[in-house]
Amino acid sequence: MSIGWRLAMRAALYGSDGFFVRDDAGPAGHFRTSVHASPLFAGALLRLVERIDEALGRPETFDLVDVGAGRGELLSTLLATLPAGLAGRVRPIAVEIAPRPPGLDPRISWRRDTPDRVTGLMIATEWLDNVPLDVVETDEHGTPRKVLVDRRTGAETLGAPADAADLFWLSRWWTGPGRIEIGWPRDAAWADAVAAVRRGVALCVDYGHRRGDRPALGSLTGYRGGRQVPPVPDGSCDVTAHVAMDAVAVAAGHPYTMIRQREALKALGVDGARPPLDLARTDPAAYLRSLSAAGSAAELIDPSGLGAHWWLWHEVGVDIRGTMQPCHPTAPPATRKTD
């Protein structure tokens, strides 16, 4: 039986035996995110946490919320590196559908939904791309129709015309015919998450597109065991689609800033520069360590890879704009809007 992609993704990813629910190695066993690529990513976020903490006036409790936490890798790394003055005030919260992994730091709270009130930083790294959505495609008459998929084989057929909610979103955010990934479920999910932040920053890190560069053939795909595979929604692989970042940004209802990960990480001290050759002569071990760090940094800021991810953040009751501007004169300006 064929069903819409949104229902198929929900069952395949979050059902009783879904891809993200199974008790295995978790996402890190199937695809590589910035969190898994290098501890330099967590180090950059630590510097951001410190700046937000300072902007908040060092509150008694600093909430550090990771939405789509995987197996808790990011929070575990951050907790291990927090300075003493902050470590005692941080309340780490992992939001994840999968069961709590064994051996996780007991300081990390594990829950299936976002907390009601957050003072601090809420971060979602490659979460929205896995929020289920429907796909529509224009037929030979130009009518947008819902794409149906067989959960066992991934074979697609065209179903009924798109419903009113899909058409409304399409008319605002995705111009032109073709294959269209309807993003309003991601808009709603992010708006709900941001609404929980009473003071602080909500940060979304994900791969996506804006109105001027929508993928004409869509971006829906799958990942399994480190390889890209056809997106068959049978629970055996990740099923993901790029995020309409501009729609998500506006849906939250707060002013926002959006820049590429490459520029964000450079602003936070990750530059990928190779160590000077003189260091190889004076301290070979230090040179090798620095060279390894430079390689990891280069992967995080690669403009054709992880560096092309978008960083979208909303400031609620704080102002960190000055701390997140690109730090070299040739960088494009950050996008900051209120609409």
Image: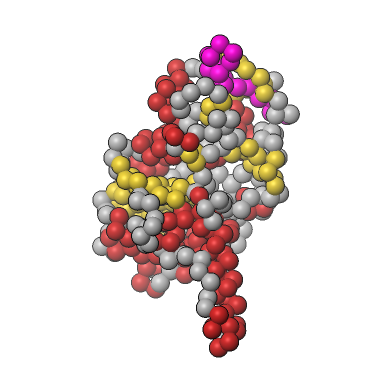
Q: In the rendered image of this protein, does residue 260 appear above or below residue 265?
A: above
Tell me if residue 124 can be seen. no
User: Residue 154: horizontal and vertical position, in percent?
Assistant: 70, 29
Q: In the image as oriented, which residue stretches furthest toward the top?
A: 141
Within the image, what quadrant is residue 250 found in?
A: top left
Quadrant location, the C terminus:
top left
What is the image's colouring? secondary structure
Instruction: Give the magenta range.
Output: 136-152
Q: In the image as oriented, which residue stretches furthest toward the front?
A: 330
User: Residue 136: horizontal and vertical position, in percent?
Assistant: 55, 23
Compared across the picture, whether 24 is left or right of 245 comes to right
Quadrant location, the N terminus:
top right
Q: In the rendered image of this protein, does residue 236 appear above or below residue 155?
A: below
Residue at (71% x, 25% y) in the render: 155
* Residue 321 is covered by the magenta coloring: no
Residue at (27% x, 54% y) in the render: 319
Q: In the rendered image of this protein, does residue 80 appear above or below residue 250?
A: below
Residue at (41% x, 63% y) in the render: 268
Query: Which of these two is toward me, 258 or 118?
Result: 258
Residue at (69% x, 36% y) in the render: 230
User: Residue 68: horizontal and vertical position, in percent?
Assistant: 52, 47
Compared across the picture, whether 249 is left or right of 126 comes to left
Query: Which of these two is toward me, 200 or 287?
Result: 287
User: Residue 315: horizontal and vertical position, in percent?
Assistant: 31, 49
Query: Which of these two is toward me, 123 or 40?
Result: 40
Tell me if residue 114 can be seen. yes
**Count the marks: how many?**
0
Q: In the image as oriented, which residue stretches furthest toward the right?
A: 153
